[in-house]
Amino acid sequence: MSFIPAKPGLVEQFSAIVGHANCIADDAGMQPYLNDWRGNYTGKALAVVRPANTDEVAELVKLCARTQTPIVPQGGNTGMVGGGIPDTRGNALVLSLGRMNRIRGIDTENNTITVEAGVILQALQDAAMSAGRLFPLSLAAEGSCTIGGNLSTNAGGTAVLRYGNTRDLALGLEVVTPSGDIWQGLKGLRKDNTGYDLKHCFIGAEGTLGIITAAVLKLFPQPQSSVTAFAALPSPQAAVELLGSMRAAAGDRLVAFELVSRVCLDLVLRHFPGTAEPFAERHPWHVLIELNDTMPDAPLQEMLETELGRALERGQIADAAIASSEGQARALWKLREDISEAQRLEGKNVKHDISVPISRIPAFIDKCDAALIAAFPDISLVCFGHVGDGNLHYNCGLPDQGLGKADQINSIVYAHVDESGGSISAEHGLGQLKRDEITHHKTKIELDMMRALKRALDPTGIMNPGKVL
Amino acid sequence: MSFIPAKPGLVEQFSAIVGHANCIADDAGMQPYLNDWRGNYTGKALAVVRPANTDEVAELVKLCARTQTPIVPQGGNTGMVGGGIPDTRGNALVLSLGRMNRIRGIDTENNTITVEAGVILQALQDAAMSAGRLFPLSLAAEGSCTIGGNLSTNAGGTAVLRYGNTRDLALGLEVVTPSGDIWQGLKGLRKDNTGYDLKHCFIGAEGTLGIITAAVLKLFPQPQSSVTAFAALPSPQAAVELLGSMRAAAGDRLVAFELVSRVCLDLVLRHFPGTAEPFAERHPWHVLIELNDTMPDAPLQEMLETELGRALERGQIADAAIASSEGQARALWKLREDISEAQRLEGKNVKHDISVPISRIPAFIDKCDAALIAAFPDISLVCFGHVGDGNLHYNCGLPDQGLGKADQINSIVYAHVDESGGSISAEHGLGQLKRDEITHHKTKIELDMMRALKRALDPTGIMNPGKVL
């Protein structure tokens, strides 16, 4: 791939649209936008622009369409797969939506909020809360990721079990199409069967079909009571069974059901001095459970005690701790939330963001663990995640940090994912990272349909080239 | 439009694929498939075929693709907009999926069921119940509609408030594409971000992009307690306010919130002798409320009494009746469910299946009522529906059954729908009925994207021509 020199005058034209201060073309100024936060991807660009509104986005895209300039939309730049980082040709425009951060309106009777793409997820959660509502999307990057990025990657997080993925929270979108037209699809309707539901084309498309500039999102009643527990279990199978009985009893009160392996818990205990083993004995597996309710005085603790008591009798759990204060609940959540950081402190490892049907989690872990240990006897398997929606973060540590072994490890893990009817990217998307890999896991028919969709909506291919497909 | 004669030998070739008994080509045998149940649409066809499995569907579609034979997929033929009825050219193949009615599997740990397109909705509900689970989709035609049709029209019904539309219940699809390929997308995953989510192209597309042959659907815990109430209100605004306070208090326990106007209630009382006015006085508006819970002894009655008591104090309701037995609950539901039939017995009227944001329901009803009464002083407005998801069935009766006035009535109603940011087809789809009308309510940008999608996935246009767009 050779470097294509900047088209003369293009940067000046970008600048004329967004204003000089919002068109960054110097190397130092562009750096934060050309590197991902984990240091895995570095790209080049003609310029980074920060439009103030949808009309400016449309003008920029029209100019790019005329000049065949590739566009890389970028939100909070918190992605895991390099989806928001341009390639190294240097001919792309990075279109950062951070300045479009207005909350356009909250409709409490319709339980909806209308926001621009650059609104930080936490600001969105706060705005909902100020209106006495819950916006349930919650994930580690919520302090810096933007809702536009969440929509473009169909972000998941910890509350999917109850509230679904970002896709499920969107009622309407405003999108700038690859020709620079503005599709005004900001409807706040829960029922609308008037032809193809176009918003689903753009959600999860990682900016390859158009630029999401605003959205109407669902709001929910705020929970008024909650309870958190941590249970010790003999096996993932016991966790799946407990999930079943818990869900049957608690219904939608069950909002989190997170798996934590022994290795994960040890990592957290080793790297975070304030943490403590929650049980008298060491156990091989754990789950973190959270229930909530809109009733202020809901009998959640009793419900949890009853179900955990029964599970203890059935031998599904070995021990359990129910938080009796918000401080205790936070301490239990820390044992789950600090796993990623503890892992990072431990050194690099080969990460997988996979999903399988919930019923197949136990066999997947058993067989995949065995195959990896056979191939790499000193491997350390850091397995945790959202059992409630079949999503495991299945990470592989090796004494030499897995250097040079990633391909072999991936091929073992992905073969077991395929055998289980699973997905090699549950919630992080494809971006640059899995763009080639996915071609080995989808049929030609499916890939051809994806390509047909791309050609139909972005016929000249200017939208985020080199991502997804 | 001229009649195109049958291609010689084509019927014999269809017959060779599905067997003689499942290829119907005589006029009398084809009649049930060429007319809709309401008697609004009549079409012609080369033949009606009833394939036994997905391979036969694929073979049929390949043959049709080779010979450029239009295909009209048909489920239970219970649609409201003529989507499953061919046009009158007589050159189409009607592909009825009724024989593909196997439940391929239930995975209780994954809370999913895998079914073929021809499974009757009620059989699906029953299969879920036998496995101790709930399949929540519920609508008037459930005894004869098929899940393939429900998916193709993204059917709604009475439980959307809590469980979403059919789209929200689907995790994976098997689809025969317009070239006769089988897309095997039957994944039972709650998180899968590996490129464009193709299932959303086919759901709600009314058979214009491919043929859904099977699906993996979500199951839910079975409710163990429920309570039903009927409340009298002064206005739709009071209903919207009550919905807000009810939802804040009950959260996901609130599964139905249905509006019934005075006119509707009178229609039911007049045509169904067993029914009775539920209150001592007559009131202009009513809502039917249902709460349920997975807890067998959930305090639903108290919750309802508390909230209705507060609403009474605030003047939001004038009276309320809470069912104290299942028989009473059924009697209250009948007041809502019998509206359609009571209306039919009263004579033809001009029907609308519309949605608006919940917050705009009161103003929509006020203004649209006023405009219609100004134009037609003797109009009778039969307004009822799913307030919880903004969906109103807003039907207009006139002494002469509205003969010749439908266009004028529609144009008044749809103008108010547009002004409210609403939809002219909330849950029934476009089919033949609203195919032209919709072009006046969507922008060129949106219509162009729909057409691009159609060309991308069905380039030769053989799938259900003349429907949707």
Image (cartoon, coloured by chain):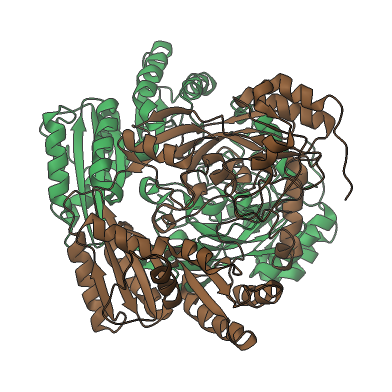
Chain colours: A green, B brown
Viewer can see residue A119 = no
Give the side of residue B44 with respect to residue B271, left or right. Answer: right
- Which of B87/B270 is in front? B270
Query: Vertical placement of A298 versus B383: above or below?
Result: above
Residue B130 in which image quadrant: top left
Q: Position of residue A427 (x, y in %)?
A: 48, 41
Viewer can see residue B150 = yes
Q: Position of residue A243 (x, y in %)?
A: 28, 37
- Which of B410/A260 is in front? B410
Residue A451 in which image quadrant: top right
- Which of A279/B100 is in front? B100
Which residue is depicted at the point 78% across and 31% down?
B64
Q: How many marks?
A: 0
Query: Vertical placement of B424 versus A261: above or below?
Result: below
Q: Position of residue B71 (x, y in %)?
A: 73, 38
Give the side of residue B210 with respect to residue B121, left or right. Answer: right
Which residue is depicted at the point 62% across and 66% down?
B424
* The C terminus of chain B sits in image quarter: bottom right
Q: Position of residue A455 (x, y in %)?
A: 76, 43
Taking the view exactly as shown, the residue that stands out farthest to the top is A374
Give the side of residue B161 with respect to residue B34, left or right. Answer: left
- Which of B391/A371 is in front? B391
Query: Vertical placement of B286 versus B146: above or below?
Result: below
Query: Vertical placement of A66 versus B49: above or below?
Result: below
